Image: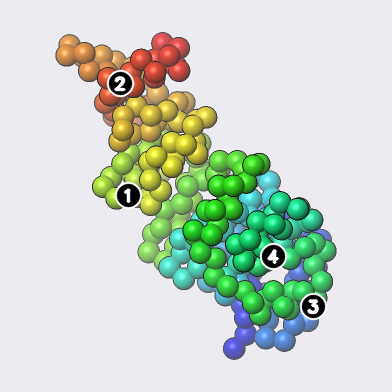
Amino acid sequence: MSQRVLVVDDEAPARERLQRLLGELPGCKVVGVAANGQQAVQLAGELRPDVLLLDVRMPGMNGLEVARHVALLAEPPAVVFTTAYDAYAVEAFEAQAIGYLLKPVRAEKLATALQRAARLAASRLARITADDPARAPRTHVAARLGEQVRLIPLAEIYYFAADQKYTTVRHKGGSDLIEDPLRALAEEFAARFVRVHRNALVNTHSIAAIERDATGQYYVLVRNLDERLAVSRRLASELRERLRL
C-alpha cells in the first residue's frame, strides 16, 4: 500500500524538490502541496494523508503550530519536520524522538524518515513549544468539528469563556468549543487578552466600555456584540488600569 504524503513548505523550490524526491521513491504518493500553515491544516483534514512533510520555519503559522492543530484531527497524520540547520530545533526533536530532516533534504534521508514516521503525540509537541525560547503565540486556535478542524484567527476572537471541561470561543463567525484550558490561553495570549473573571478572557480590542451597576458590579461591553460579561471585583481595578480607564 502506498504512503500518501502532504508536502508543506512556503518556498516553491523546496516544495518542488520534495515532490521530485518523493516521486522517485517506490510506494510513495504526493496527495497534496501547501504553501502555508492554513492551507496545510485544511488539506490535512480534506486529504487525510499518512504523512505530513512539514517545514518548521514559515511566516505566519509555523510548522509547530500546524502540527499542533493537525493533531486534533480524528486520524492525524504522522509528521516529519524539515528544517534548515537549527541547533535548538534539532536538539529538541532528538530529545523527543520526533522525526526531522535537515535541508537540503537528501533522498536517502527522506526514505529513512518516511519509514520511521510516527504519529506525533500532542504531549511531545507541547514540551517542545513550551521550552522554545523564541516561541510566539499561535496565530489561530483550532476547534475540532467531527473529522475536520476549524481554524479561528486570533484577531477575530471576542472572548474565551470556561465551559465545564471545554472552553467556548466567541468569534466573528459564531461560537465553538476548544479543548485548551483558560489558564493556558491566558498565559499564551497575555499580550492581547485580559482576564475579567476566573471564567472569562476578553480580547482587549473587543472591549467597548466598562460599566458599573447600582450594586457595584462591573461589566465589560463586548464590541459588535449585544453582550456584557461580568468582571470580578478582584480583577476590576487591574482591568481599569490596563485599559487606562
Which callout, 3 or 4, points at the residue further toward the start of the chain? 4
- Quadrant (top left, top right, bottom left, bottom right) of the N terminus: bottom right
Question: On the image, numbered disc 2 is attached to which residue?
Answer: 234
Q: What is the C-alpha distance between the residues marked 2 and 1?
A: 24 Å
Label 4, secondary structure: give it. strand
Which callout, 4 or 2, points at the residue further toward the start of the chain? 4
The colour scheme used here is rainbow
Crowding at dot 4, Cα within 10 Å, few <14 / some 14-19 / many 20+, comes out as many
Crowding at dot 3, Cα within 10 Å, few <14 / some 14-19 / many 20+, comes out as few
Question: On the image, numbered disc 1 is attached to which residue?
Answer: 166
Label 1, secondary structure: give it. strand
> Disc 3 residue type?
Glu
Identified at 70% across, 57% down, the residue is: 91
Q: What is the C-alpha distance between the residues marked 1 and 3?
A: 44 Å
Which callout, 1 or 4, points at the residue further toward the start of the chain? 4
Question: On the image, numbered disc 3 is attached to which residue?
Answer: 108
| Residues under numbered marks 3 and 4 in contact, where contact means CB atoms less than 8 Å apart | no
The tally of labels here is 4
> Disc 2 residue type?
Arg
Identified at 22% across, 18% down, the residue is: 217
Which quarter of the figure has residue 214? top left
> Residue 111 placed where, x, y %?
73, 78
Which quarter of the figure has residue 44? bottom right
Q: Residue furthest front?
A: 95
Closer to the camera in the image, 140 or 124: 124
Q: What is the C-alpha distance between the residues marked 1 and 4?
A: 32 Å
Mark 2 against mark 1, which lies toward the viewer?
2
Which callout, 1 or 3, points at the residue further toward the start of the chain? 3
Q: Does residue 122 appear left or right of residue 103 in this picture?
A: left
> Residue 104 placed where, x, y %?
82, 63
Q: In the rendering, which numbered label is found on residue 100? A: 4
